[in-house]
Amino acid sequence: MEYFDALETRSPEVRERQQMAALPSLISFAKSYAPAFGELLAEVDAEAVTTREALAKLPVTRKSELLERQQASRPFGGFVGDWRGRVARVYASPGPIYEPEGRVADYWRTARAMFAAGFRAGDLVHNSFSYHMTPGGWIFEAGALALGCTVFPGGVGQTEQQVQAMAELRPEGYAGTPSFLKILLEKADELKLDLSCLKKAAVSGEAFPPSLRDALAARGVLGYQAYATADLGVIAYETPAREGLIADEGAIIEIVRPGTGDPVPEGEVGEVVVTVFNRDYPLIRFGTGDLSAVLPGISPCGRTNLRIKGWLGRADQTTKIKGMFVHPSQVADVIKRYPGVERARLVVDNAGGQDRMVLNCEAHADAALGEALVASLREITKLRGEVAFHAPGALPNDGKVIEDVRKYE
């Protein structure tokens, strides 16, 4: 088995010790470099943040806050310090939210994920991620170049021209969305062009179901996922073991209860929160809004970092009930008041023609507790609700805090 570097096979204890030891310096730097973190972490003693428990006490920053701060202070909302001359490129994601790219090689830490997908020096990579305004194309180009690959910047669209170029240049690898790779292969069949040169693919940006993975493999293309975002870079990546996604060595992943910053037990579905060791854009406890869960044990491929199940949905389950928005954080605020409640799920229906919400709780049935929960639910959401009790473990482990089952016919 080949590995990108020795970091991948460190003992979990050594990795944890080294990452935790690096946190105080990162937090201290972020406070002094980025005005937004200077404000958010003003009361935090950086030198005391040397454990996951201490890290979990810091606030989670989510995209909504990033957008609000950027709208008040362009371009980066105070999350990047003196950026002119330091930032190589600026990108825009929907919102718009602006993201910086620093000047270091492989800024998004993509090379490790591409290496795990089989890419090696000398490969020609056909890159079909967008190069326009968003960083997708650049994220994977940077990783490919760091590995010593050559890149053809195909970008999006112009399917026939891309297929023609692939048939003539004979790339070994592809980077892009898996669905577009399928389109390219089908277009090649239609044009009677040979793309048997393609053997490997680094895919991202959308779901990669087993059916599509197997369909590509049947054509000789082995595709592996990289879980990445424009702000954080690569968070986790797939390996030939095909057992979950392995956390990138430059990131600390936490799984928290949606709407909170509280870590959930191993195996429970929650929101992916990430801290990256990036001095150009030092995001600390950044909430991705994605749901996942930690897989136990070490990957059969020999890489020893934490593993997650992959993308399991979105954490932002905010819904409107009787004209009022109800947020997962409000549900969390209710159950925090009652230690006897292990988990809760607010189910919204309209079976009788009117919106109704029921707070389903894993707790011993108790009339007094039920009345207290109803009162707290109304106090926090400003809406009337009901409470139903369930045995521990009865609620689905899917990360849902609010489930909207209303039907409109």
Image (tube, rainbow, N blue to C red):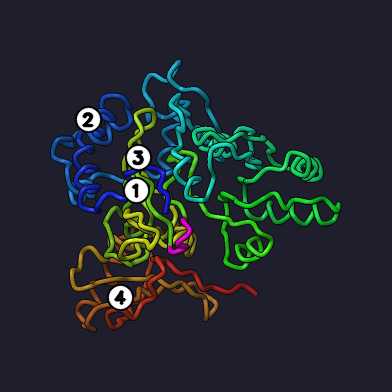
Q: Residue at x 63, y 52 (%)?
A: 199
Q: Which quarter of the figure is the C terminus placed in?
A: bottom right
Left or right of 376, for residue 201? right
Sequence-wise first label, 2 or 3: 2
Find residue 12 and report its horizontal and vertical position in percent. Answer: 25, 53
Instruction: Specify the principal SS of the magenta part.
Output: loop
- Residue annotated with mark 2: 28
Q: Is residue 240 magenta?
A: yes
The alpha-carbon separation of the residues under discs 1 and 2 comes to 27 Å
Badge nearest the viewer, 2 or 4: 2
Question: Does residue 133 appear in this view?
Answer: yes
Earlier in the chain: of badge 2 and badge 4, it is 2
- x and y, in percent, of residue 117 in the image: 52, 51
The amino acid type found where label 2 is placed reads: Ser
- Magenta region includes residue 251: no
Amino acid type for the residue under numbered disc 1: Glu
The span from disc 2 to disc 3 (Cα, nearest Å) is: 14 Å
Mark 1: secondary structure: helix
Which one is in front in this view, the residue at disc 1 or the one at disc 2? 1
Residue annotated with mark 4: 361
- Label 3 – label 4 distance at C-alpha: 35 Å
Tag 3 residue: 276
Q: Which tag, 1 or 2, sits closer to the chain's start?
A: 1
